[in-house]
Structure formats: structure tokens, C-alpha cells
Amino acid sequence: MRGTACAASRRFMHRVSIELVPRSLESLAGHLRVLAECFPSVRTVNIPDLLRFDVRSWDACHVARRSVQRAIPHLRAMDFSVKGVERLAGVLRERGLSEVLIVRGDAPQDLGRRMYSTTSAELIRALNEMAPEVRAYAAFDPYRAGLRAEIDSVHEKLAAGAVGLFSQPLFDLRFMDLCADQFPGVEVYWGVSPVVQDASRRYWEVKNRAFFPSSFQPTLEWNREFAVSCLEWARERQQALYFMPIRVDLERYLGGLL
């Protein structure tokens, strides 16, 4: 029985991703070493494309693939023209990447940076046509535009060819349950992120329009307990999770949990 339980645990770990911030190739290498040493059963990472750093997500994922089985770069739809998707497909092939997460993206602070009106659904559709071997995930953010509007947007992305979703981090299992019921049969990586300062909570509430349960406490202990609850929920419902450890040491946050 123990062997069966261990095998099931290993299978579940394939449903867990860790979001890594590519501040530099050196810092990325450090994060990957921590994963290899402390969380060897986690074989998936997802990496955002943050304009304030020099390392692009697809280059970071190319490096990460040397350490993990799956590396999923975030692509900002507004950075790409639908007419230029052939070049994007070529970049992904050159770096050996077969999965991406398409997000709309926020307007850059550098007003001189080129932007396009491309929507997530348009980029997903164009990429599917040009590179059908690339599996494109879409973003799910139930906060910013309201749940009903976001559900409609997600169905548009799924119709365009998205194979699954990555959610904005959620902080209440009841809300996670409600959202999961809207997408039966869809592969969703539900976001979980520690918030350990009152200032961070205010950021999530003001910037991202997130909300927290009345039981929430901005402590590492509360966030570790919530992570345990999310892992149990995901195993029971055969869902997937990704952890986004912002301003928290990964080993302190998830040590002993994964």
C-alpha cells in the first residue's frame, strides 16, 4: 500500500508548478538548485515575462529545461503581432519549448516600447495555426473584470484553442471551489501565493482587486496551512496547482509540504 501511495504522490507532483521570477540567469540558477535539492519531485516551472528584467521568459525556460521536465514561459499578447506569429513560433522551436501561457499583459511603463492590440484569444488562435505542436494555456483572473465577464473571456480563449488555464492566485478555498465548478473537464493550474505583510495584502486588494477570507493572517504559518489545504483540495478534485512565492524563501514556505 505504501508503494501505491508514493506512486500516487509522484503522479500528483506532475500537477504542481512553481513560478520562478527571472531577475537574472544567476538568480534563476539558484532557484533551480533549490528545487533540485529540496523539491526534486516538482518537475514543472512557469516563468513570467517581466519587462523590468533583462531575461525574457522563453530564454529563462530554455535554461530551466536543463533541470526540469516542463518549463512554461508566460507570453504577453500585447507584445506580439498576429502577423508576426511565425517568428514567435520559430523562437519557441529553437528553445525546445512546447508549452506557453498567454496573458494579455499590463501596459509597459516605457511609452516608447512597441505594443499591439493583439488579444490573448487572437494570439492563441494564431499560434495554434502556425505551431499546432505548442500547447497554449490561457490566464484566468476572476477579480479584475468580475467573475461573469471573466468566465465569458475564458470560454473565448478555450474556443480559440487554449488547452487549459492558469489562474490568478486565490486565497479562499470556497471561492476556488466556485471557480472550479465553472470549468468542468478543463485543466486548471490554480494559483497560490503567500502574503506575509499587511502592505502586500493591500497591494493585492488595490492593484489586483483580490479579496481574503476573514480568517486570513499575514503570517507564514497561515500561508503554509492554506498551502496544505490547497494541496489536499487539489488531490481530492484532481486539480493542478502552481505556487508563486513572492518575497518568501521557497524552502521556508513549502519545505515539508511537497
Image: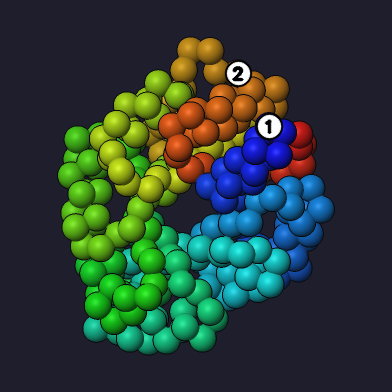
Task: Name the spot of residue 64 as percent of width and height, x first.
Answer: 65, 68
Left/right placement of residue 200 relative to residue 106 reads right
Question: What mark, if any, has residue 217 been given in the picture?
Answer: 2
Which residue corresponds to the image point at 45% horizontal and 24% vertical from the top-left? 173
Task: Name the spot of residue 19 as percent of width and height, x first.
Answer: 58, 52
Which residue corresponds to the image point at 37% horizontal and 26% vertical from the top-left? 177
Query: Callout 1: 10 Å neighbours few (<14), some, many (20+)?
Result: few
> Which amino acid type is shown beneath numbered disc 1?
Met
Q: Quadrant of residue 162?
A: bottom left
The chosen color scheme is rainbow
Residue lying at the far right in this picture: please name it. Answer: 37
Which residue corresponds to the image point at 56% horizontal and 63% vertical from the top-left? 70
Task: Name the spot of residue 258 as percent of width and height, x first.
Answer: 68, 39
Q: Quadrant of the N terminus?
A: top right
Q: Nearer the viewer, residue 215 or 124?
A: 124
Check whether the beta carbons of the residues at disc 1 and disc 2 lie within 8 A of each other. no
Q: Quadrant of residue 2?
A: top right
Which tag, 1 or 2, sits closer to the chain's start?
A: 1
Give the labeled residue for mark 1: 1
Residue lying at the far top in this picture: please name it. Answer: 214
Query: Callout 2: 10 Å neighbours few (<14), some, many (20+)?
Result: some
- The local secondary structure at tag 2 comes to loop
> Which amino acid type is shown beneath numbered disc 2?
Gln
Q: Is residue 180 visible?
A: yes
Disc nearest the viewer among 1 and 2: 1
- The local secondary structure at tag 1 comes to loop
Task: Name the spot of residue 234 as percent of width and height, x first.
Answer: 49, 34
